[in-house]
Amino acid sequence: MSGEPERRTASANGAEPEAEGAVPCREGEIETSVPDRFEEQVRLHGGLIAVKCGDFAITYEELNASANRVAWALLDRLGEGEEPVPLLFGNDAAMVAAMLGALKAGKAYVPLDPDIPSERTGYVVGDSEARLIVTDGQNIALARQTAPDGARVVNVDDLAASAADGDPRLPIAPDRLALLMYTSGSTGRPKGVMLTHRTALRDGRVPAYHYGLQPGDRCAQTGSLALGGFLRRLYSSLLNGATLCLYDAKKRGLAGLVDWLRAEEITMLGARAVFEGLTANLKEGEILPSVRHISFGGDVVYRHHVLQARRFTRPECVIQSNLGSTEAGSIARYTVPRDMELRELVMPVGRPLPGMEVLILDEERHPVRDGQVGEIYVRSRYLSRGYWRRPDLTGRAFFPDPDGGDRRIYRTGDLGMFGLDGLLRHRGRADFQLKIRGYTIQAGDVEAAMRELEDVTEAAVTGQERTGGMKRLVAHLTSPPGMRPTVTSLRQALARALPDYMVPAAFVFLDEMPKTPLGKIDRRALPPPGTARPELANPFVAPRTPIEEALAAAWRDVLELDEVGVNDSFLDLGGNSLLAARVINRIRNEFVAEVEVSSMFAKPTVAAQAVAVLQAQASSLGPEAVSELLKRTRQ
């Protein structure tokens, strides 16, 4: 790091006050192991429900016994050494028991989802250097298929109920490896994030301190248990005496989610991944009376998320936006005042949580001023160890603290800024910062403006190259049923909120957005714009004269479209000043007419340009020549 960045960290005066009913987080609760903390909950709340999945429920005592049977099976087969153990289960209590069992045996578990492609599963198992896979009878065939040569497969369904189920009570240090969470980078190749017991415990205690999570709360988990977003809910629930309620949205669909939330009396809801489906299935005036806390994280949080959350919750429900990552855990949090007028399109993510220090740096890693966008770096002692067997990636993302000590610095790859109010704003991934025609554009700013439109449900903005290498801004969007807008109306609405260079050149309408397993928009799966004429407000009118046909042909070539109507606006078709210059060059060469580039915007249709060409020729050729030309163009 060069320069001395302005430091942003939580303090007694700077951090938001803890939630009502919050239990202070003591250092000793983190400087231990996950099994120690979980077993304390078993002693305190053994008869309470730990995990609920459909009609099946398991208490803390029963879950502990199941986990212990897994732990003793692992110790019998692998001994006490630290090593990764892949777990292949569906979204059920057996996966939770296997996770805890691996930790009790001093192993680092590797969660696997049986619904992801087997090729990826095989890669993760091989990369983790696993000697053994734990699974159940439902997934035994896939486990055997993906097990490396010589690796063993343990079926938990074969573990006798009479097997040893006492706590192993191994001495496990806080910095011991607890799990490998495989995530995909920009190349799509999975990389294993190494997390310790200390990082897991810190993430598990944050909700208790800041959300007031406590025994009796019921926490919803709607996605895969093999994904990073689940970690916070797993540990925050089971390390605080709450109930983890499982709903597999991928298999059960979102239509029944509202009824499930009511039936299970869910109190804590992480809504980002299922939010669009949730709100679509809520009737006007319906509320979720038991929900007392909604957390938005995992991506940029927009104003409409908060407005919708206010619509279906009680006035006392706490709504928060968060920033976090698998490598750093929970970084920052912001409680949105219930009665606050929301002026910003993108919600702040607040102030750094205790133990987290946020630095905003430029490309040379110099600090930027408040109000300027830079990349978010985090300084903390609660960071991941790095990436499993990838010292190259680890070296690019993790740095030693120049001040010394046990803290390190992590480069998040996210863009952000501190406002003059001291609140952190998340501006999306640095990968989504686009350079279009010399302008630097934050894709999230354009997406935020699009999401404000009533006929846009979801939006994703990318930069895509035209033939010849010129990059253009492309917007992909979904709309409510029966409310699909025209490109003309979209451009007009966005032009009122954005400078012209930030208005997308092309719009791609989708029935639904492609999503990653985490529920984020999968930008790599977004289709490119086609060559069909976009849906405009005006109907298509074909060229009527040879000069209009020649001009339309020039527009089609430059704009890469199959057809162009004579009354179509050049801007609505995706035109810009650089493309206008190409069209004007064609006009000058083909018609020997001096037409200015500005005329493409003053008279932005083929019909108007045809008149402009004739006028330019009249001034240079003389009336007799023009009269002859007019006769030919009418033929």
Image (spheres, rainbow, N blue to C red):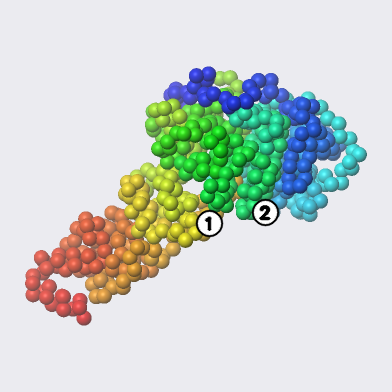
Give me the residue at 22% from left, 65% from top: 608
The quarter of the displayed image where residue 505 is located: bottom left
Q: Residues within 10 Å of mark 2 (few under 14, many from 20)?
A: few
Q: Nearer the viewer, residue 17 or 29?
A: 17
Q: Position of residue 259 (x, y in %)?
A: 65, 49
Q: Which mark is residue 91?
A: none
Q: Which mark is residue 251?
A: 2
Q: Residues within 10 Å of mark 1 (few under 14, many from 20)?
A: few
Work out whether 65 lies above or below 596: above
- Give left or right: position of 459 versus 257: left
Give me the residue at 87% from left, 43% from top: 159
Q: Nearer the viewer, residue 318 or 463?
A: 318
The residue at which mark 1 appears reads as 512
The quarter of the displayed image where residue 17 is located: top right
Residue farthest to the left? 623
Work out whether 534 lies above or below 632: above
Element on which disc 2 rests? helix
Find the distance from the CA under tag 2 to the CA under tag 1. Answer: 17 Å
- Give left or right: position of 172 versus 358: right
Element on which disc 1 rests? loop
Q: Amino acid at mark 2?
A: Lys
Q: Position of residue 43 (x, y in %)?
A: 79, 27
Q: Is residue 626 visible?
A: yes
Residue farthest to the bottom? 635
Q: Amino acid at mark 1?
A: Glu
